[in-house]
Each structure stands twice: as structure tokens, then as C-alpha cells.
Image (cartoon, rainbow, N blue to C red):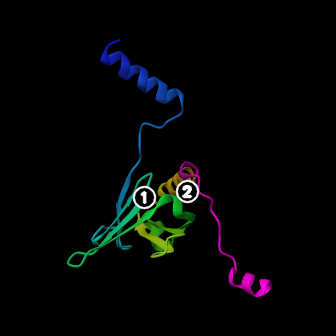
Amino acid sequence: MSDMDRENKAAQDAQDSGEDQEQKEFVERKRWIFFGLPFTFTKYTVTDEVITINEGFFNTKENDCYLYKVQDVELHTSLGERIFGLGTVACYTGDNTHPQLFLSHIKNAKEIKDYILRASETARRRRRTLNTLNIDAEDIDEIDA
């Protein structure tokens, strides 16, 4: 069997098993609401594994959050954002450093929100993690005493 035949067979097997060969990546810049211009130094990158926020020009800060930690996603659009085709995606996570991530004033906000929601569920299933919430866990100690 030639190398070309092997590659075609591997591609066909991956397609038959439902694996997605194409991995999406969204890269957006935070924009001014006025005219939706990207004159800021904040860049958001969303892949199938992680959300990365890079901020700053002189002093830079990079924040990452794995998608399997995302518990809920919301889309916020003000009147000004709707006029210029922008939106803000709020991600509520189980991350210790940033329990709430905001991807502010970005284009394609609805598409990115939907992608994060689907990809976070896929990442949790792939890692076999359980999404749980901490609801007044302190009161349990008082009941046991």
C-alpha cells in the first residue's frame, strides 16, 4: 500500500468515526463602541482547548482559561453595540483567578458564544469532568456538628 493510499485511508477513517479534522480558532480585538474600531490593545483568542486574553501595550497581561472550566456563557449587547454589530460575551468559569471572563465589544459575538458553549461541553466530555456548583457548602459543616 502506498503512502498516498495510507493517507487517504486515515482521512476516511477519521471522517467515518466523526472526528473533526478542522479545528476552529477565533481571534478578535476589543473594539471601541463608537464605530466599532479596534483601537485597543486587548486581543481575545478562542480555540477548542483554551480562551486566552492578552491585554496591554507597555505592561502586558495574558490570562488563559481552559474551556472545560466554562460553566455558562451569556451574550450582552447594548444599543450602541447592536448599532455597530458588536457584543460582549460573558463566560462564567470554575477558574480561580478569573471566575468571570468578559470578551468585550467583539464582532461575531453570537457565533463565538455558541462556539464556546458547544466546545466547553465537548471538552468536559473529552476530559470526563463533571460540572458541579458549590451551593452553600459551608452550611453542611454546621448540620453535621
Determine the secondary structure under disc 1.
strand
Residue 34 location, x and y as percent? 36, 73
Residue under the point 32% across and 13% down: 2
Residue under the point 44% across and 54% down: 49
Quarter occupied by the C terminus: bottom right
Q: Which span of residues is magenta-colored? A: 125-145
Residue 120 is inside the magenta segment: no
Q: Amino acid at mark 1?
A: Val
Q: Which residue is mark 1?
A: 50
The answer, for residue 76, to whether it is visible in the render is no
**Residue 120, above or below 57:** above
Determine the secondary structure under disc 2.
helix
Image quadrant where residue 84 sits: bottom left
Instruction: Tell me the CA gap for discs 2 and 1.
Output: 12 Å
Quarter occupied by the N terminus: top left
User: Which numbered dot is residue 117?
Assistant: 2
Q: Which circle's residue, 2 or 1, is located before the other in the chain?
A: 1
